[in-house]
Amino acid sequence: MIYIDRQTEQEMMKKWDETAKPYEHYCERSPYFHEFISRSGIKPGDTVFDMGCGSGTLCVPLAEDGYTVFGADFSEKALDSVRDVVAERGIKGLTLKRLSFLDDWDDAGIPVCDHVFASRCLTGLDPAVVLPKLTRYTKKRVCITIHVNHHDGILSGFKYRGSDSLEYEKACFNTVIDMGYYPRVDYMDCMFDEIKGGWTFISWDV
Ligand SMILES: C[S@@+](CC[C@H](N)C(=O)[O-])C[C@H]1O[C@@H](n2cnc3c(N)ncnc32)[C@H](O)[C@@H]1O
């Protein structure tokens, strides 16, 4: 598979900026949120780094529940949506950074957290580059979700081939093994807008 380089990442950033929606656009504490969090193993008092946090599906409710959360995304518009809801509700404990997967996260001051999430955001990124990077920022567990569908289609405005999405899932699984960890694989059957397929949830403990 061919993975994106920094230039393509910058081009994708513009596209994500165009599609970013306000936090309220999505169902709050959606089935997706519950399915993800129930598999994450987080416990009260844990810290979370939510990379590719988008409009706040995971990081906003977690911060409301009292977790200390770092959310990062390369879309300023998505981050603005989160900032709006944080200001409206007076949410504490959520630190936001504008960051891409291929940026230097140490420079941005992201600390090593108990848990690291990369939910529905690994589009086109080389697992051999980004999964070790996510792993370096966790003390306990990394959780990622990937869209998996046997058929070709469009998701969030991006075209995908079913065969590529399955190859991507395998590449992620193999990368976790290559790093010396044991990947847990589970499936979440909660899509949106009648899009077919589901989410593969992969997690590993460090
Ligand atoms: C489908 S949304 C998912 C948002 C959230 N994690 C969730 O599960 O609802 C994908 C998000 O990933 C971000 N994203 C995609 N590629 C990225 C990259 N290379 N670096 C940083 N953020 C990225 C996009 O800006 C977008 O906000």
Image: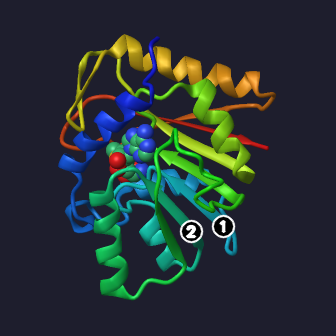
Q: In which quarter of the image is the C terminus?
A: top right
The three-letter code of the residue at mark 2 reads Val
Q: Is residue 8 above or below residue 201?
A: above
The quarter of the displayed image where residue 132 is located: top right
Residue 47 badge: 1
Q: Tag 1, which secondary structure?
A: strand
Question: Front-most of 63 and 196?
Answer: 63
Q: In this view, does 38 lie above or below 154?
A: below
Q: Which residue has dot 2 on it?
A: 69
Q: Does the residue labelled 1 lie within 8 Å of ligand 1?
A: no
Q: Is residue 149 above or below residue 78?
A: above
Q: Is residue 107 above or below residue 22?
A: above
Q: Where is residue 16 in the image (x, y as percent from the top left)?
A: 27, 44
Residue at x 58%, y 59% (from the top left corner): 108
The three-letter code of the residue at mark 1 reads Thr
The quarter of the displayed image where residue 135 is located: top right
- Please give left or right for residue 136 compared with residue 122 in the image: right
- Please give left or right for residue 186 compared with residue 106 in the image: left
Q: In this rendering, does residue 169 appear at all?
A: yes
Question: Front-most of 203 and 5?
Answer: 5
Question: Front-most of 196 and 67?
Answer: 67
Labels 2 and 1 touching (C-beta < 8 A):
yes
Q: How crowded is mark 2: few (under 14 residues within 10 Å), some or many (20 or more)?
A: many
- Please give left or right for residue 96 compared with residue 81 in the image: right
Give the number of marks: 2
Q: In this rendering, does residue 120 appear at all?
A: no
